[in-house]
Amino acid sequence: MPKKILIVEDEPRNMKVMLMVLRPHGYTLLEATDGEEALEMAVRDKPDLIMMDMQLPKMNGIEATRRLRQMPGFNHTLIIAVTASAMKGDMEKMIEAGCDTYLSKPINTRELPEVIAEMLARRQEDNP
């Protein structure tokens, strides 16, 4: 069964790039454009991994991540913070909110599939 990845991104060009890069790898790709929609989709679709933009309308990525981590069944869901603002202290805030790692924008399209594959493989080893 293909792994499900929820991509939470409000910028259409960035969403298009991530979809183009990940689609050939056989994942089931889900799309959300704000934090509220991300929460609804996560509860409904139970993704294996969430790529969470931090600067989102309605509810930012940090708040959406915090809320997800408080919900039953989401304490082990992989969450990658995706952000253009990598200021001092930002990484700590993202990890503290519950993100497993972060990637800075612009996304390195060569590394993205590798990072995701490694994270999913590691998670599967931890929870067979």
Image (spheres, rainbow, N blue to C red):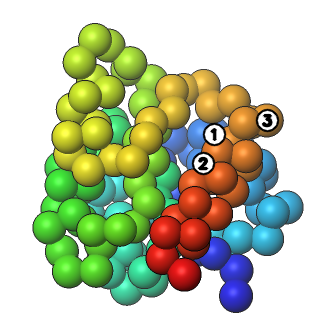
Mark number displayed over residue 110:
3
Instruction: Work out how far the residue at label 2 is from the one at label 3, CA to CA, in angstroms.
Output: 16 Å
Q: Residues within 10 Å of mark 1 (few under 14, many from 20)?
A: few
Reply above or below: 48 against 120. Answer: below
Instruction: Work out how far the residue at label 1 is from the one at label 2, CA to CA, in angstroms.
Output: 5 Å
Mark 3 and mark 1 residues within 8 Å of each other at the beta carbon? no
Reply above or below: 82 against 36. Answer: above
Looking at the rendered structure, the kind of residue marked 2 is Met
Reply above or below: 21 against 109. Answer: below
Looking at the rendered structure, the kind of residue marked 3 is Arg
Q: Quadrant of residue 3?
A: bottom right
Q: Residues within 10 Å of mark 2 (few under 14, many from 20)?
A: some
35 or 1: nearer the viewer: 1
- Left or right, 24 with reference to 112: right
Q: Position of residue 92 (x, y in %)?
A: 25, 28
Q: Position of residue 55 (x, y in %)?
A: 33, 36
Q: Which residue is mark 2?
A: 15
Q: Marks 3 and 1: which is nearer the front?
A: 3
- Left or right, 72 with reference to 80: left
Residue at 41%, 54% in the rendered image: 79
Identify the mark nearer the N-term, 3 or 1. Answer: 1
Q: Quadrant of residue 32?
A: bottom left
Residue at 38%, 18% in the rendered image: 86
- Left or right, 45 with reference to 1: left
Looking at the rendered structure, the kind of residue marked 1 is Arg
Q: Which residue is mark 1?
A: 13
Mark 2 and mark 3 residues within 8 Å of each other at the beta carbon? no
Q: Is residue 36 visible?
A: yes
Mark 1 and mark 2 residues within 8 Å of each other at the beta carbon? yes
